[in-house]
Amino acid sequence: MTTIQRWIRSHWFRAAVALIFVLMLGLIFNAEGAFFKWDTHRDMLRHISVFGILACGMTLVIITAGIDLSVGSLLGLSAVLFSLFSIRMGWPPVPAFLACLAVGALLGTASGGLIARFKIQPFVATLAMMVFARGLAKWISGGQKISTAVLQSDGTYRYVEVPHIFNVINSKILNQNLAVVTLVLLGCTGLCWIILTKLRWGRHIYAIGGNEEASRLSGIPVTATKLLAYGLSGFFCAVAGICQAAQEMQGDPEAGISYELTAIAIVVIGGTNLMGGRGGIGLTFMGAMIIGYLEKILSINAVGEASRLMLTGVIIVGAVLFQKFRK
């Protein structure tokens, strides 16, 4: 098989073709030139960044042949905690960051523990964590959004200032041409790339996804590796939750509902195999661009949300079938 043939049959080629196809749709259906403006692309990157951060952790989990349904709920919990610490309790940014990241990583590791030590199916374990984290977010917030409007004992509201860190995360740099949350996405993508390609843990993640029993017999620490993968997924959920809170200027306990579906779609459309053992963070980034541009093109052409959701579902099925029947 020649190099060109291998490239054509690779996931990279297929992801690139899909992205080019979506971009061509944008060129054709450009909404009277809106697609040609940089603001459209900047806003697309900003919108997809939170989903892309979630997809970074989802990539690690799926390569181990697992799944994480709790990412949306962990995002909502992290948004509530970060808003509570920063707005209501007045914590400095660093302690607030560290506390949220620690909670996210801890709960993600707890899911990994249920899967690795107690042999609970990833679907069931992370479904339980999804429900638990959502309930915890509602319990902590009292079922209310944590915002700058603070309810007083007499029934009136007192308004506090938005913490400066919220404005920093939600800002744009380079003459308003690049959102800070997009830089956060690039940082998370780079961290995953280092883990998967430069560290021993990355090789272990691929090995477990390819054949868990063979990996165990080869001396690979399967339990520790799964704990790492799910712990990092929780960590990235916390990062995404912080960004979500900054963008919305509040902590909403309902934030992140169904975000896990978009995160999975990004990973699968990029080409990472749901059966584990194959894929990569670069493919996930390509998947984020495909989903982001597709949603933006449909949005600027005034396609309704219902149609966008149905189309996304069809694309996910198509991507999985494309993987299953590849030659």
Image (cartoon, rainbow, N blue to C red):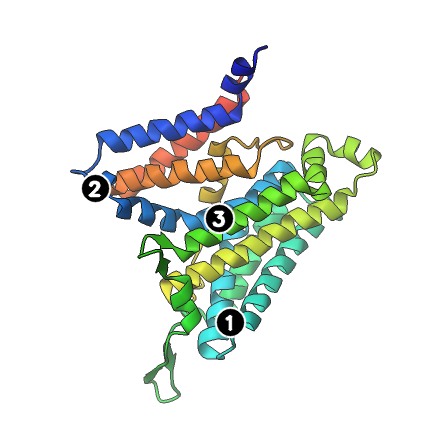
N-term mark: 1 or 3? 1
Q: Quadrant of the C terminus?
A: top right
| Mark pair 1, 2: CA separation | 37 Å
Query: Label 2, on which residue?
Result: 34
x then y, percent, for residue 188: 53, 50
The residue that mark 3 highlights is 186
> Would you place residue 23 above or below residue 127 in this image?
above
- Mark 1 lies on residue: 93
Please give the name of the residue rendered at 43% of the width and 58% of the height, measured from the top-left corner. 255
> CA–CA distance between discs 3 and 2?
25 Å
Q: For the residues marked 1 and 3, what is the alpha-carbon distance in whole angstroms?
A: 21 Å
Residue 69 visible in the displayed image: no
Q: Image point 48% across, 48% down: which residue? A: 186
Q: Secondary structure at mark 3?
A: helix
Query: Which callout, 3 or 2, points at the residue further toward the start of the chain?
Result: 2
Q: Could you tell me the amino acid type at mark 2?
A: Ala
